[in-house]
Image (cartoon, rainbow, N blue to C red):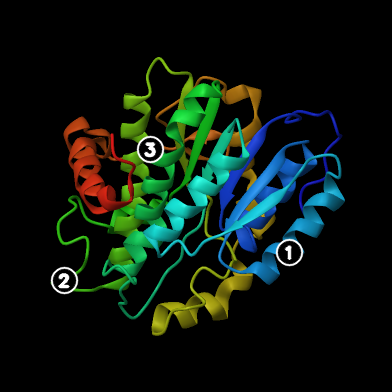
Amino acid sequence: MGEKVNDNALMKGKTVLITGATSGIGKETALCLAAKGARVVCINRNKEKSEELLRHLYAVCPSAQHEYLIADLSSLKQVRQAAEEFLSRHSRLDVLINNAGGYFNPRRQTEEGYEYTFTVNYLSHFLLTLLLLDLLKQSAPARIVHVSSIAYLVGGKAFDDVMTEKSYWPMKVYGRSKLANLVFSTHLARKLRGTRVVSNALHPGVVNTNFSKESQGLTGRLFAAFGFLFKSPEKGARTSVYLASSPEVEGITGKFFAGKKFFPTLPWVTDPQLGEHLWQLSTGFVKPYLPAF
């Protein structure tokens, strides 16, 4: 179960929202932050597993009012509904952890006609973040944590054909979604200057989780066969917990972490023009689910 810490109430009174917390890195992150005193709210797609997680959260921190929201992140409509439900119940949000993700093969489309990997791993989190941004600003100092990966290196250098209408190579599609997480995190940090809301991304390492369980083909079989060689979910969650809770990173923003250290990125990843291009592209996709201004 989650990391046992001396209950020094490090996160007492703080509300954390995390996506995809019924297994793997997300579950361990949720349990560790609950053990530090946080109220943990999870967005998951499976009610039965969410109920099980809730019992574990109350076991490590019975004093906080933990809860879950049900939403399938492949549905932007459900993402909006989950955000609205959260906003109706909560007057503050101290930490948003965009954690959920997976490796999917073969290609599939969401109910809204978008490519599945890009939507689940990135676009749903882009929308969720925008919908909760005002509350994060009101709750400042606040933190946004994006689970990316050094797999971004195989994602290419541009965001062309993000819906894979021309070709589908699953590893490149996965890498591009993680590139999007990283570029979004960096560009968001620029847009949030002066708000006391920070945005950082992380590489958790190669972790033995269920992230490829819905995949066919060689890659999915290799992950299943050799998962025992990878990091445990508990170790994989450590950087997420660090960025969400540690006083050491107070005020640090726009960085890519592996462990407790900055991880260098290729120079073009932080290009403001690339960041703005992705921002405008993403806004176009999610515009039907944004409130009218």
| Nearest the eye: 291 or 202 | 291
Residue that label 1 marks: 51
Circles 3 and 2, Cβ within 8 Å, touching? The answer is no
Q: Residue at x 24, y 37 (%)?
A: 275
- The disc, 3 or 2, on the residue closer to the chain's N-terminal end is 2
Name the spot of residue 292 as percent of width and height, x first. Answer: 29, 39
What amino acid is labelled 2 in the image? Glu
Q: Secondary structure at mark 1?
A: helix
Chain-order first, disc 3 or disc 1: 1
- Give whichever of discs 2 and 1 has the lower sequence position: 1
Which label number is shown at residue 185? 3
Dot 3: element: helix
Instruction: Determine whether 17 is above or below 52 in the image.
Output: above
Q: Secondary structure at mark 2?
A: loop
Left or right position of 136 against 7: left
* In the image, residue 75 above or below residue 284: below
Q: Which residue is tagged 2?
A: 165
Q: Residues within 10 Å of mark 1 (few under 14, many from 20)?
A: some
Question: Residue 129 placed where, x, y %?
Answer: 42, 41
Q: Considering only vertical position in the picture, is 242 above or below 191?
A: below
Give the quadrant of residue 75: bottom left
> Farthest residue in the top direction?
194
Q: Amino acid at mark 1?
A: Glu
